[in-house]
Image (tube, rainbow, N blue to C red):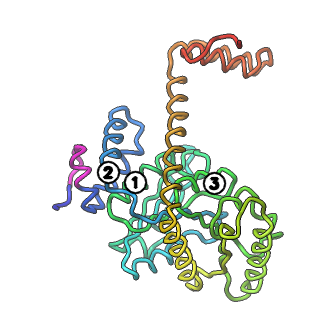
C-alpha cells in the first residue's frame, strides 16, 4: 500500500488500512488521534479502535518499570535489538513525565534509544503521562491495541517511576518486569510490597564490574523476600535475575523466561482469562473517567462548584455532603443522604 502522505485529515477507513498494513506514518497519526481531547477526534478515535479490535490480541505485552536511573531505556533498547535479531517486530510505548507548562513529554525516548529508533522493525512512541496515576498515559490501552493491529509482535510499555499505582501497568500487560538497582540501600526497603505482589519478574540491573557482587546479593535478598510473601503460589512467585543492559548480559535469559511464561499461560487458558479481566477493568475505568467529565462539565454543577468548594475549604460543609450535592446537581443522586 502506498504510504498516506500530507496533513489532510484521514478517514477512519484510511486510518484502518494504514495501521493494519504496517504504515508507521499512519500509525503515528492514529496514536495522535486517540490521544487527542478534541471533540471532533473522540468519536473518530472510538470508531477506529472498534474496527481494529479483530486485528489485535496476538502480541506479547510486557510492562517494564523501575526507579529513574535504573537503566530502563538501555535495557529496553538491548532487549528490543535482541528481539529484532530473532525476527520480531517491536513497539515501545514509553510514557514520559509531563511538562507542567506545555503538557508534553519531558524526556526524549528516541534519543535515549538511538540504535532501536532507527530500526525499520521497531516503533517507539513517547507519550506524556499528563499526571495519570501509575505512570501510564490515559490512552495507553488504545495505543497498545493500535500497535498490535499494526503487526508488532512484542509491545514493551515503559512506565514512569515505581509506586503502588503501577498496578495500572499490570492491568494492561501480560507480564510485568521490575528493574532494580544494586547497592541502593536496604534492598528490601527499596521496593514497595504492593509492587512485589504484582510483578512477574525482577531483574537487578547493572550487574557488571564492581557492582556485580552487590547485584547478586540484592537478587538473593529479593528471592528470599518473594518466597515469604503471602498470597503468591510457588508457580506465581516472580523469578529474579541479574543483568547488565550496558554489557548486554542476562537479557536473553530474561526474554526466554518471559516467552516460557507466555506459552504456559496460553496452554492453560490463563492468558485469555487475564485479558478478559483486563477488558472489564478498562471498561469501568473509562466509566469513571467519563462520569468525572460529565459531572465537571454540567452547567448546574459549574454554577455551585465555587460555593461548595469554599464551604469545604472553610470547614463548614463536609466533603461527603458537598459531593452528594454536586451529584444531585448533575442528576445522579438525591441532595440529602437517605
In percent of the image, x 70 and y 65: which residue is there? Answer: 233
Give the residues in magenta. 5-17
Is residue 9 part of the magenta span, yes or no? Answer: yes
In the rendered structure, the answer to whether residue 106 lies left or right of residue 324 reads left
Mark earlier in primary sequence (3, 1): 1
Q: CA distance from mark 3 to mark 1?
A: 20 Å
Circles 1 and 2: CB atoms closer than 8 Å: yes
Which one is nearer the viewer's eye here, 113 or 294?
294
Q: CA distance from mark 3 to mark 2?
A: 27 Å
Q: Is residue 48 above or below residue 336?
A: below
Secondary structure category for the residue under label 2: helix
Secondary structure category for the residue under label 3: helix
Q: Which residue is mark 3?
A: 166
Give neighbour class at mark 3: few <14, some 14-19, many 20+ (Cα, 10 Å). Answer: many
| Occupied quadrant, residue 337 | top right
Q: Which mark is residue 145?
A: 1
In percent of the image, x 52 and y 50: which residue is there? Answer: 278
Mark earlier in primary sequence (1, 2): 2
Q: Is residue 33 above or below residue 162?
A: above
In percent of the image, x 77 and y 19: which residue is there? Answer: 318
Q: Which residue is mark 2?
A: 52
Secondary structure category for the residue under label 1: helix
In the rendered structure, the answer to whether residue 200 lies left or right of residue 196 reads left
Mark earlier in primary sequence (3, 2): 2
Q: CA distance from mark 1 to mark 2?
A: 7 Å
Give neighbour class at mark 1: few <14, some 14-19, many 20+ (Cα, 10 Å). Answer: many
Q: Nearer the viewer, mark 3 or mark 2?
A: 2
Amino acid at each position: 500500500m502506498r504510504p498516506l502522505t500530507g496533513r489532510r485529515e484521514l478517514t477512519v477507513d484510511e486510518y484502518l488500512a494504514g495501521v493494519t498494513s504496517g504504515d508507521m506514518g499512519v500509525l503515528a497519526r492514529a496514536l495522535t488521534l486517540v490521544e487527542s481531547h478534541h471533540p471532533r477526534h473522540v468519536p473518530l478515535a472510538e470508531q477506529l479502535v472498534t474496527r481494529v479490535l479483530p486485528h489485535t490480541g496476538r502480541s506479547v505485552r510486557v510492562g517494564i518499570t523501575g526507579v529513574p536511573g535504573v537503566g530502563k531505556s538501555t535495557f529496553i533498547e538491548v532487549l528490543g535489538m535482541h528481539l529484532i535479531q530473532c525476527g520480531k517486530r517491536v513497539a515501545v510505548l514509553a510514557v514520559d513525565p509531563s511538562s507542567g507548562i506545555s503538557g508534553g513529554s519531558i524526556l526524549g525516548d528516541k534519543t535515549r534509544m538511538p540504535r532501536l529508533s532507527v530500526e525499520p522493525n521497531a516503533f517507539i512512541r513517547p507519550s506524556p503521562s499528563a499526571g495519570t496515576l501509575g505512570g501510564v498515559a490515559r490512552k495507553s490501552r488504545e495505543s497498545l491495541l493500535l500497535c498490535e493491529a499494526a503487526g508488532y509482535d512484542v509491545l514493551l510499555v515503559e512506565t514512569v517511576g515505581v509506586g503502588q499505582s503501577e498496578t495500572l501497568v499490570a492491568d494492561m500487560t501480560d507480564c510485568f518486569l521490575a528493574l532494580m538497582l544494586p547497592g541502593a540501600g536496604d534492598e528490601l526497603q527499596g521496593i514497595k510490597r504492593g509492587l512485589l505482589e504484582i510483578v512477574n519478574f525482577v531483574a537487578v540491573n547493572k550487574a557488571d564490574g564492581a557492582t556485580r557482587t552487590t547485584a547478586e546479593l540484592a537478587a538473593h535478598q529479593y528471592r528470599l523476600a518473594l518466597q515469604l510473601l503471602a498470597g503468591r503460589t510457588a508457580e506465581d512467585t516472580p523469578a529474579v535475575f541479574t543483568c547488565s543492559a550496558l554489557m548486554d548480559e542476562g537479557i536473553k535469559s530474561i526474554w526466554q523466561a518471559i516467552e516460557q511464561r507466555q506459552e504456559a499461560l496460553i496452554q492453560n487458558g490463563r492468558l485469555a482469562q487475564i485479558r478478559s479481566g483486563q477488558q472489564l477493568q478498562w471498561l469501568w475505568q473509562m466509566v469513571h473517567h467519563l462520569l468525572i467529565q460529565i459531572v465537571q462539565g454540567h452547567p448546574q454543577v459549574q454554577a455551585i462548584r465555587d460555593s461548595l468548594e469554599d464551604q469545604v475549604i472553610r470547614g463548614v460543609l463536609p466533603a461527603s455532603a458537598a459531593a452528594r450535592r454536586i451529584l444531585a446537581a448533575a442528576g445522579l443522586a438525591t441532595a440529602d443522604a437517605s
